Amino acid sequence: MRGKLETIVGAMFAGKTSELLKRILWAKHQDKKIIVMKPNIDNRYSNQKIITHNDLSHDCYPMINWKTALEEFEFKKNKVDVVFLDEIQFMDTKDTITNVENILNQGIDVVCAGLDQDSRGKPWETSSMLLGLSDKILKIYGFCNVCGIEATKTFRKTEGGERTKVGASNIYEPRCLKHWEPR
Ligand SMILES: [Zn+2]
């Protein structure tokens, strides 16, 4: 049987990594064999861990690309039950779709988490493709830093800079549509 793909998306500070962590802990509780990976680009707090904004964490493999990940792990059903991917928006689109499909075809489940949009409101390609491939989707919301209602957007507090800039609360914050503008 083909594995199941679940994708968790939302704006920054919505709690995506917390949702992923919840599923990691549940899988471990069920004695499942797991692999947790995130792109090496994101070294905000630590490279070897996925860390939530409220400081919960789990060990992970800092992935340079899929080629090195395939050298590191054997994605076979007898070796692994669930693969967890964090910060999917920074993974190569084509390679990620190909490899996630291969993993699913092995009968291994995949759970991904990441941003669906950048601070300009543009869809992240890899996240979009994974959403299109998903069996289950969870979109979660933060709270607007200005008015406190549900936030669907990530607002960039400073102007300019490249798209893939990673950063915490000093650069980005969650905003509702009324208080957000693309930057
Ligand atoms: Zn607002």
Image (cartoon, grey):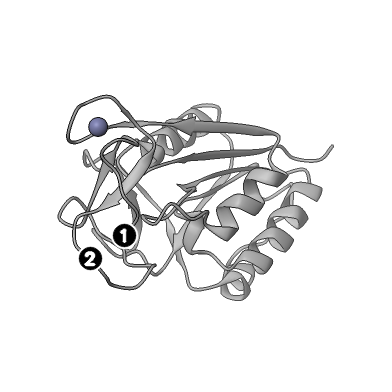
Residue type marked 2: Glu
User: Regarding mark 2 in the picture, which secondary structure is present there?
Assistant: loop
Q: In x, y percent, where is residue 117? A: 46, 51
Ligand 1 location (quadrant): top left
Residue type marked 1: Arg
Q: Is residue 12 left or right of residue 86?
A: left
Q: In x, y percent, where is residue 8? A: 51, 38
Residue 70 vertical placement versus 175 (above, below):
below
Instruction: Work out whether mark 2 precedes mark 1 in sequence or the reverse, and give the earlier one.
Output: 2
Which quadrant of the figure contains the C terminus? bottom left
Which quadrant of the figure contains the N terminus? top right
Task: Tell how many labels.
Answer: 2
Quadrant of the image occupied by residue 82: top right
Residue 50 vertical placement versus 17 (above, below):
below
Mark 1 Cα shell of 10 Å, populated few (<14), some (14-19), many (≥20): some
The disc at residue 183 is 1
- The residue tagged 2 is 159
User: Regarding mark 1 in the picture, which secondary structure is present there?
Assistant: loop
How far apart in space, not on screen, are marks 2 and 1 (Cα)?
A: 6 Å
